[in-house]
Amino acid sequence: MSARAERPLILHVVYRFAVGGLENGVVNLINRLPEEAFRHGVVSLTDVSEEFCRRVARQDVIYIALHKGPGHALRLYPRLYRLFRSLKPAIVHTRNLAALEAVVPAWAAGVPVRVHGEHGWGAQDPDGTRTRYRRVRQLFSPFVHRYIALSQHLERYLVDAVGIGKARVLQIYNGVDTERFRPAKEAPVAIPGYPFQDPGLWVVGTVGRMEPVKDTPTLARAFVRALQRSPEVQQRLRLALVGDGPLREATRRVLEEAGVAHLAWMPGERADVAELLRGFHCFALPSRAEGISNTILEAMATGLPVIATRVGGNAELVADGMTGWLVPPADPEALASRILDYFYHPEVARRHGTAGRSRVIRQFSLEQMVARYRETYEALLPARRGERNPAPVSPTPGR
């Protein structure tokens, strides 16, 4: 066997491999980790989007879709066990609660290293308080060697609420490509299909999957309330909602019922997010829950002021009153007021945007993120090599 083939294989296990912040983080990691150091595979418990896979630059990545139906992954255990035995990964890295169950067949198959990443909570448990989900995490914790929390908020949750020993939890922020996501130059570049390129317009926009946890209807309601303030606002303020998902039609109805749908743009999913962000004046994220938002980081890297809800890890990214504003979740009035603050005070918006990009370059670079993951993987491998079927980790809190 060639040395190239003997590189450790990392299997990234996710619920679905399609457009999303978590999944985009996996793509960035695969693309940036040295090719001579690791091989990669993606195992999706449900589906794999062929279009999304094109974002992966490497040609040697394995993609496997298991097409799981609703409910627990218990029925997939035999398939996962056989898969892990066949591929012999050095590391299985599961992400979020929906994929956590895969650590059990990984342990049974003798996978030397099992890593689990916590990226944020879903709509079923937006603030991480449901006892059921804490107990599920506790149940599977003996089968995980290392936890990676994407925010300090999630790190505290794993240690204090779930009872994972602090030594087993590592906090690593997402990183953003500051070359791809950069501020606009003096002369804006024409973006195909984008209707708001008149320099007299002022655009607040968002990017992301339109699902309950992202709460895009609240941004639509805030836009309506802002438009109602004065004729000047109605002439210049515009809204861009980029993305798709189950709440797209509900979001559209909010705008149509208010008679302002013609002042908003909802193009669905777009591949040119970096270019679109350079066409915005302000970025807004009305989420009910977040881990570490890739889109906030991308907007900050683009030099945009950010208005985000004070949930999850958002306060670790947005410095309130310095790089943007934090508002309560599900509060369209507060969101509308902050949109208008930037609309009426563009110098503040520019100052916050400039400070946000500087903050990203200092603290949230893609290079820093990739280096931390590489260090983690390489540190775990020597400690586990030679263990044919390593025993589960003690679940005792504090260990």
Image: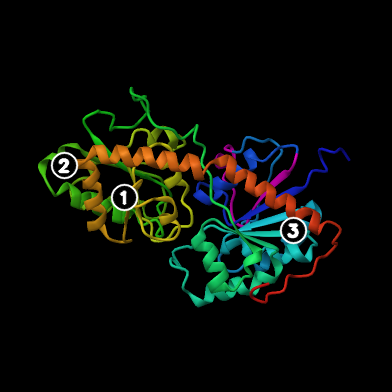
Q: Earlier in the sequence, mark 3 or mark 2?
A: 3
Q: Quadrant of residue 92?
A: bottom right
Residue under label 1: 321
What is the number of the mark on residue 233? Answer: 2
Query: Relative to residue 330, is residue 381 drawn left or right?
Result: right
Q: Position of residue 147 (x, y in %)?
A: 63, 61
Residue under label 3: 113
Q: Earlier in the sequence, mark 1 or mark 3?
A: 3
Tell me if mark 1 has few (under 14), some (14-19) or many (20+) residues whose alpha carbon lies within 10 angstroms of its own: few
Q: Amino acid at mark 3?
A: Val
Answer whether residue 387 is visible to the viewer in this image.
Answer: yes
Tell me if mark 2 has few (under 14), some (14-19) or many (20+) residues whose alpha carbon lies within 10 angstroms of its own: some
Tell me if mark 3 has few (under 14), some (14-19) or many (20+) residues whose alpha carbon lies within 10 angstroms of its own: many
Q: Position of residue 218 (x, y in %)?
A: 29, 56
Q: Look at 85% across and 62% down and name the residue there.
A: 388
Q: Look at 48% across and 74% down and name the residue there.
A: 130
Is 316 drawn above or below residue 347 in the view shown?
A: below
Assign the C terminus to one quadrant of the image. Answer: bottom right
Q: Amino acid at mark 2?
A: Val
Q: Which residues are magenta?
A: 37-55
How many angstroms separate mark 1 from mark 2 (CA)?
23 Å
Q: Earlier in the sequence, mark 1 or mark 2?
A: 2
Is 89 drawn above or below residue 178 in the view shown?
A: below
Q: Are marks 1 and 3 in contact (CB under 8 Å)?
A: no
Instruction: Please name whichever residue, 232 or 104, is drawn nearer the observer in this view of the structure.
Output: 232
